[in-house]
Image (tube, rainbow, N blue to C red):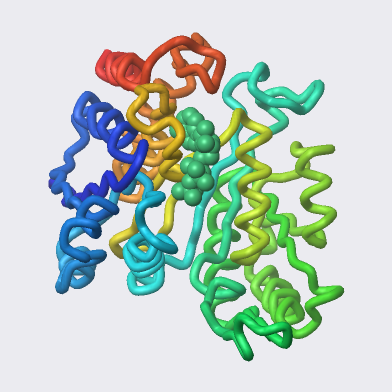
Amino acid sequence: MTHKVAVVPGDGIGPEVIAQAVRVLEAARAPIELKTFDWGAERWLKDGTTLPDGAFEDLRDNFRAILFGALGDPRVPEQVHARDILLGLRFRLDLYINLRPVRLLDERLTPLKGKTCKDIDLLVFRENTEGLYAGVGGNFKKGTPDEVAINEDLNTRKGVERILRAAFEAARGRRKKLCMSDKANALTFAHGLWQRTWKEVAKEYPDVETSHLYVDVAAMEMVRAPERFDVLVTSNMFGDILTDLGAAIVGGLGLAASGNIHPGRCSLFEPVHGSAPDIAGKGVANPLGAISSAAMMCTHLGEHAVAARIDQAVARAVVEKQVTRDLGGTLTTVQCGAWVADAVAR
Ligand code: ATP
């Protein structure tokens, strides 16, 4: 069976890193049929299109996954195209799990003294459709000295429960430890709901050891003792912050991969970094985050052997320093992609 996958290279370094991810998928002979879409800043500047009519339905009904580069261009006011395309897909496809692995591949890459690869291997489940990102709020007397600005933190029982369940399920397949992080001591209503739901769902997973940390303590502990964590589940905003911290302790943005997932539905996989206009076109962008995202996509498609081969090749590239300059190597984007593709094919 061949899986249909939409490829959206996007802006800036997006096309550069996605070209390498595609090359690696091809080298791995993944049973995937790719179709590329030109959505991004160029298209918007040309004809004002963000997500064309019918595109959402086409993706939902005809594709199993989307491999996404990055969106963001200084020529587009307020990045309207990025909001429509990326956030639009996240919300309309109801991709409620933002999954971000934080795994150290080489001790030399962590700024944490004395920590080894064994110590840093966690999986963050960030709620991806609610919270402070729900877009509920507004301005009153905007632009005046009396301005009021509000963003509401929206949490639903259904939304909280499903992300917690997904995290518990994942913990079962790993070291069976789950930490839930919130700020229920200050956000008593919204995160009171997280607390109650977490305690209820935990009863269904007696084999999983659960713990709770307020988010400020969780941030501290990720730096002080990352070995405490196996699966970490948290809200949209806190997940955003903790996963960037996670990227920083394993080698930076260039390596970080992510999935925006709704199990069983068309889901979107993208490197965590943005379009990085400062290095676009220079051939120095690290493609490993995009390549690892493609591996996560293969897992979503049920192609576990292909995913494992790609992951191993990425780990080898890092250990053998066959990497770009952000990781201390000398390779270009294309050379690094070619090295991983060769390793996968072997
Ligand atoms: P956006 O708003 O789209 O997130 P940004 O420039 O604010 O864009 P990033 O694109 O994530 O944020 O990049 C932040 C910095 O990290 C860039 O300036 C770049 O130097 C570096 N960076 C990001 N991605 C990579 C990569 N793949 N390889 C090397 N360096 C990278």
Q: Vertical placement of 148 versus 198: above or below?
A: below
Say which quarter of the image contains residue 85.
bottom left
Residue 189 shown left or right of residue 67 in the figure: right
Q: Residue at the bottom extreme?
A: 140
Q: Position of residue 139 (x, y in %)?
A: 60, 85
Q: Residue at the front extreme?
A: 144
Quarter occupied by the C terminus:
top left
Towards the viewer: 28 or 290: 290
Residue 86 shown left or right of residue 266 in the figure: right
Say which quarter of the image contains residue 295.
top left
Residue at 23% x, 68% y: name it.
60
Residue 10 shown left or right of residue 215 in the figure: left
Residue at 19% x, 72% y: name it.
57
Q: Residue 255, can we see it?
A: no
Q: Vertical placement of 320 versus 124: above or below?
A: above
Residue at 51% x, 52% y: name it.
99
Q: Position of residue 308 (x, y in %)?
A: 39, 31
Towards the viewer: 148 or 274: 148
Towards the viewer: 41 or 242: 41
Q: Residue 335, can we see it?
A: yes
Q: Position of residue 206 (x, y in %)?
A: 69, 63
